[in-house]
Image (cartoon, rainbow, N blue to C red):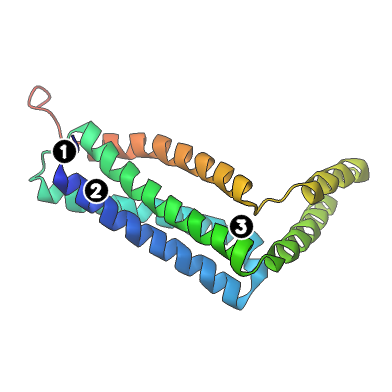
Amino acid sequence: MVNEIIKKNGITYGAITGAILCLITASIYATNLELFIAWWTTLLSFSVIIIVPIIALFKTKKELNGIFPFKEAFTTYFISAAIGILISIVFKIILFNFIDPSVKDTLLDLTIKYLISTSEKYGVPASAMNETISKLKESDPFSIVEQLKGSIFNLFFCAILGLVIAAFFKSKSTSQE
């Protein structure tokens, strides 16, 4: 059974993480769609997925009076990150598939232009570039299925990161002191 403090903080900070990620997505949608393919916006989103759950860990450890075993630390981090990612994915699925499906075509065109310019910089052969563009046009990276696949990768990334961060936050057992 999950401790109530861990559950409360995980859910609360997960909702905060999700809300921030949704605000980032909505801001990009409202201002400049090209920002969806900018490397730093991905970095910004991953930073939110890392930083807000870490804040949850600090708060939870304090509320548990410093007694914070590894399992509880990992659970707090993972609940917070997972809820945030799931809220964000649901928002993106609704935005790209129901509210404004035409954005998917615009983003595909922007992605192809970016891919072409990047490939030319690095001297990628035209045949390889054409094949990649063809595969990209056949797929729909913003479809419900592809968004869910992406969320599985994000959850896996968060699980690994959560293990590392939980090891840092866990309290020392009495046998280690």
The quadrant the C terminus occupies is: top left
Q: Does residue 56 sit above or below 168 in this rendering?
A: below
Q: Residue at x 33, y 61 (%)?
A: 16
Circles 1 and 2 in contact, beta carbons < 8 Å: yes
Residue highlighted by disc 2: 57
Q: Residue at x 41, y 64 (%)?
A: 20
Q: From this viewpoint, which residue is outermost toward the front?
A: 98
Q: Residue at x 16, y 38 (%)?
A: 68
Residue 92 % position (x, y): 55, 60
**Direction from residue 167 to residue 5 in the image, left or right:** left
Q: Nearer the viewer, residue 77 or 38?
A: 77
Using the rendered view, name the quadrant where residue 14 is placed.
bottom left
Kindly state the secondary structure of the residue where label 3 is placed.
helix
| Mark 3 or mark 2, earlier in chain | 3
| Mark 1 or mark 3, earlier in chain | 3
Q: Which of the labelled discs sits on residue 39, or is there none?
A: 3
Density class for disc 3 (Cα within 10 Å; few <14, some 14-19, many ≥20) is few
Q: Nearer the viewer, mark 3 or mark 2?
A: 2
Residue highlighted by disc 1: 68
Q: Would residue 57 be visible to someone looking at this image?
A: yes
Kindly state the secondary structure of the residue where label 1 is placed.
loop
